[in-house]
Image: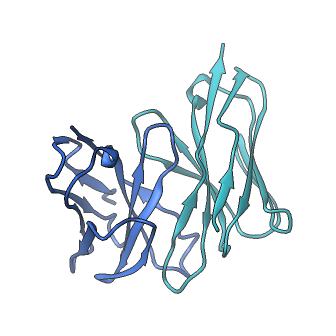
Amino acid sequence: GQNIDQPTEMTATEGAIVQINCTYQTSGFNGLFWYQQHAGEAPTFLSYNVLDGLEEKGRFSSFLSRSKGYSYLLLKELQMKDSASYLCAVRDLGGYGQNFVFGPGTRLSVLP
Amino acid sequence: ETGVTQSPTHLIKTRGQQVTLRCSSQSGHNTVSWYQQALGQGPQFIFQYYREEENGRGNFPPRFSGLQFPNYSSELNVNALELDDSALYLCASSLGSGTNTGELFFGEGSRLTVL
């Protein structure tokens, strides 16, 4: 079956660092993605990992361990605008199909 | 570069009615996927179209159907609406596999309320 787990909610302080974890069990694997979704808006792409290790992109970094079925998104120097839901998604295998399986999302609240 | 656009943005229907949602994909993208997002949850995959053919489907009943047109725009049709169909319906376009990361580009969504 397909299962992706993330914490439901997290709270952090402006300027701090927060790590959002994601564990997955999927029938196939062709990459792990993180998306940011502000309330009432569309998800926007943040990062992509297909090989084990850390990918860094400015204040955001994402890590993947395929053997452990584990990823995390690290947000540094938190800003108020980072308050949003963060969606972990695994792209399943299959021809030209790009079937993404999304986790429930982690709602991050950044406090002053 | 034109992004993904969806219409309508909001609509209200009653149980048993039918609804059609529309999506224009991002310029140059040949793959369109539809997702249902209930309040407070992650998007759930409905189906995907590549070059006008359905090539993937999630765990949704046949009353959810779709089309993709030669210009890669797409429609999602839902028949016999049920209260649980109330959700945000997201359209996402992407390039076929093998190109870049193949990430999804989402539209703003159509928020459907079924009364």
Residue at 70%, 39% (x, y): give it.
A7
Residue nearest the viewer, comparing B18 with A110: B18
Q: Height in image: A26 above or below A96?
A: above
Q: Is B101 placed left or right of A12 in the picture?
A: left
Q: Tell me residue A82's x, y (percent).
A: 60, 31
Quarter of the rendering occupied by the C terminus of chain B: top left
Residue at 22%, 53% (x, y): give it.
B81
Most extreme residue toward the bottom, as rendered? A95
Quarter of the rendering occupied by the N terminus of chain B: bottom left
Chain given the colour blue? B
Q: Is B23 placed left or right of A105 in the picture?
A: left
Residue nearest the viewer, comparing B27 with B11: B11
Chain given the colour cyan? A
Q: Tell me residue B98's x, y (percent).
A: 56, 82
Q: Tell me residue A103's x, y (percent).
A: 60, 51
Q: Tell me residue B64's x, y (percent).
A: 29, 65
Residue nearest the viewer, comparing B28 with A6: A6
Residue at 27%, 74% (x, y): give it.
B72
Q: Quadrant of residue A30?
A: bottom right
Q: Is B110 placed left or right of A90 in the picture?
A: left
Q: Is B51 placed left or right of B75 in the picture?
A: right
